[in-house]
Amino acid sequence: MRNKKAIKFNSRYPSIEDLRERAKRRIPGFAFDYLDGGCNEEVNLRKNTSKIREVELKPDYLSEYKGFNMETELFGHTYSAPFGIAPVGLQGLMWPNASEILAKASLDYNIPFVLSTVTTMSIERASELTEGRAWFQLYHPAENSVRDNILARAEAAACPVLVLLCDVPTFGFRPKEIRNGLSMPPKMTLNNVLQILGKPNWALQTLKHGQPNFETLRPYMPKNLNLKHLGLFMDKMFSKRMNEEKIAPIRDMWKGKIVLKGVATEADAEKALKLGLDGIIVSNHGGRQLDAGESTIKPMTRIAKKYGDQITVMMDRGIRSGPDVARALASGAAFTFMGRSFMYGVSALGAEGGAHTISLLQTQLQQVMEQLGCSRVSDLPSHLI
Ligand SMILES: Cc1cc2nc3c(=O)[nH]c(=O)nc-3n(C[C@H](O)[C@H](O)[C@H](O)COP(=O)(O)O)c2cc1C
């Protein structure tokens, strides 16, 4: 399966940082803070990218080179690149229709798109836009009947991979969001209204597309839920702490692949393996949960070394370029995911943002592979110094 669209990026934004800067200018401060920020003092947030960038790769300049191929087989599908779009909540708040834009781009460029339970597009719409290829990330509901109903919908939507989350036993403590009073829809404080007035393009697009909603959760939400009660509903809706007792029955009932996201230790990787799961994503939720935690490249390298031949070990967090993808794969990841990079792209460039970001990352990764003399992504570990 090849790209449906040619790789082509807008040369005015040749880096993810360019997109981030433009996103900051285009969207209201409360939406940018939600996307860009981390928890507590943001130590973990800052550390992730810098630790990845300590990884060094060696080129083979004089060896014969047979050309590059970055296609990567994952759970029975051959993707056009070794990276995918991580689940992100409230996408429509950051840019109207962001989930739809990214889902469509994932199909056009043949990379995985993971839908969050708490984003602004339904499972059914994600499936329609990706021709049944969207993965689904489940926040575990408190009531098993709701869990079963959501899983039945995901199965009916032909979702091939279910992603379970283990790194949100409690909501992250994020000072920026607390200050902004972030909720869905955002509280109309004077400060937030002023921020919206300062971003007319965002405001117009939001008017055009309508107020974003938790589309997957809509059937379980009481009608006319007011702002005051939304937080309460969300608190009651999910049972946050994941454990083996919750995963085992899901393994029994879900026929497709299951991936555990948020794994940070060898002990949890081993539990995932024993539970019969198909993959893990070593992740720290984008530096949004445990500020004192490790950056993901370190545990991923250890886990891949120990369990990489028994379970598919993937990684997200802090990846902001093609060279970063190469560094993660060379360190042992079978696949990578990015959350913010794609959301910066859409917030910066709207409908073009998904295609641009994927094209940019593919172009950068191709350049690294050619520079290294690396023909296949699976050969990247042999270039690790
Ligand atoms: C604004 C935002 C919202 C997120 N929401 C979710 C979510 O609903 N479910 C989930 O599993 N992960 C969520 N994540 C975490 C991402 O899936 C991913 O782990 C993280 O963004 C990777 O780090 P990166 O942003 O540096 O690429 C969110 C991340 C961000 C930045």
Image (tube, helix red, strand yellow):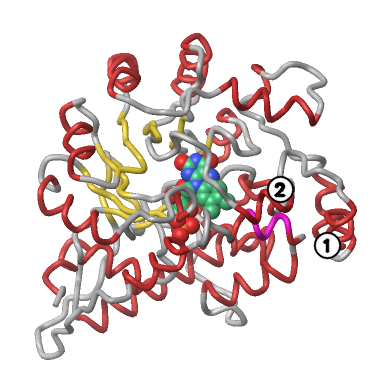
Q: Nearer the viewer, residue 8 or 212?
A: 212
Q: Give yes or no for residue 26 being in the magenta stretch.
A: no
Q: Residue 93's mark?
A: 2
Question: Which segment is the magenta one?
Answer: 30-34
Determine the residue positioned at 57% across, 40% down: 129
Q: Residues within 10 Å of mark 2 (few under 14, many from 20)?
A: many
Determine the residue positioned at 72% across, 34% down: 213
Q: Residues within 10 Å of mark 1 (few under 14, many from 20)?
A: few
* 359 left or right of 76 in image: right
Image location (x, y in percent) of residue 328: 28, 64
**Amino acid of disc 1:** Asn
**Amino acid of disc 2:** Leu
Q: Give yes or no for residue 32 being in the magenta stretch.
A: yes
Determine the residue positioned at 10% across, 83% down: 64
Image location (x, y in percent) of residue 99: 61, 46
| Residue 146 higher or lower than 261, as above or below | above
